[in-house]
Image (tube, rainbow, N blue to C red):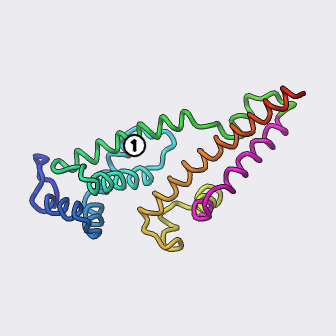
Amino acid sequence: MGEDVAGGLQPDDRVLLARLRAGDDLAYGDLYRRYAPAVRRFALSMPRPGIDVDDVVAEVFLRTLRAVRGGCGPRDAIRTYLFTVVRRVLGEWAAARRDEPMNADELGEHAPRQRDHQFVQAEGELLARAFHRLPARWREVLWRTEVEGHRPASLADQLGLTPNATAVLAHRARRGLREAYEEAAEVSGRRAAGCSRRG
């Protein structure tokens, strides 16, 4: 099923892509079942600094769906297209992780010892403020995955989603928390600077 040994598309893959482009949601499930194992194996073979492979697979198929529905995406060599998206996702996410704020523990290692308690408390307040600004659905999936330690796939039934959609939701929630945290930190920094000028 799918690609032949030479890497070309068999007719059923072309039909599948045509159905997907025409808005057939069942075609998306067929595409996922056919290629997700290969995409997962490929992602596992790549460097992934702290990045969950299930999140990568979910993002790859989501981007492919958007591209195809938008009139772009693969028309042949579907496996090559998916692998290219894996590389792109891993590159973007690895770069984002390098740019994201360090957590309180990491920051505490670099702060003077006498300021540890105040520093961690301030970071905790910023994080809490950012967390409470998120939509309820994002807060729920973040709490269940990051605090309680559940894998996104194990929460799918409870959230009324597919495992793939749950992984995508968890990734979006983490990205939303990071952005909300950065915004809260920026606001806090501006207030602190204002107080310094007035003081």
Q: Nearer the viewer, residue 24 or 5?
A: 24
Q: In which quadrant of the rendered image does the N terminus lie?
A: bottom left
Report whether 15 appears left or right of 123.
left
Q: Position of residue 116 (x, y in %)?
A: 82, 35
- Name the residue type under label 1: Val
191 versus 4 height, above or below = above
Task: State the extent of the magenta-drawn residues as a range.
Answer: 116-140
Report whether 146 appears left or right of 117.
left
* Residue 119 lies in the magenta-colored region: yes
Answer with the quarter of the image where residue 182 lies.
top right
- Residue at (84% x, 26% y) in the render: 197
- Residue at (28% x, 53% y) in the render: 70
- Residue at (29% x, 44% y) in the render: 83
- Residue at (72% x, 51% y) in the render: 129
Q: In which quadrant of the rendered image does the C terminus lie?
A: top right
Which residue matches tag 1? 89
Q: Nearer the viewer, residue 71 or 31?
A: 71
86 versus 168 height, above or below = above
In terms of secondary structure, where does tag 1 sit?
helix
101 versus 82 height, above or below = above
Q: Position of residue 123 (x, y in %)?
A: 75, 42
Q: Position of residue 79 (x, y in %)?
A: 22, 49
Q: Residue furthest front?
A: 198
* Residue 80 lies in the magenta-colored region: no
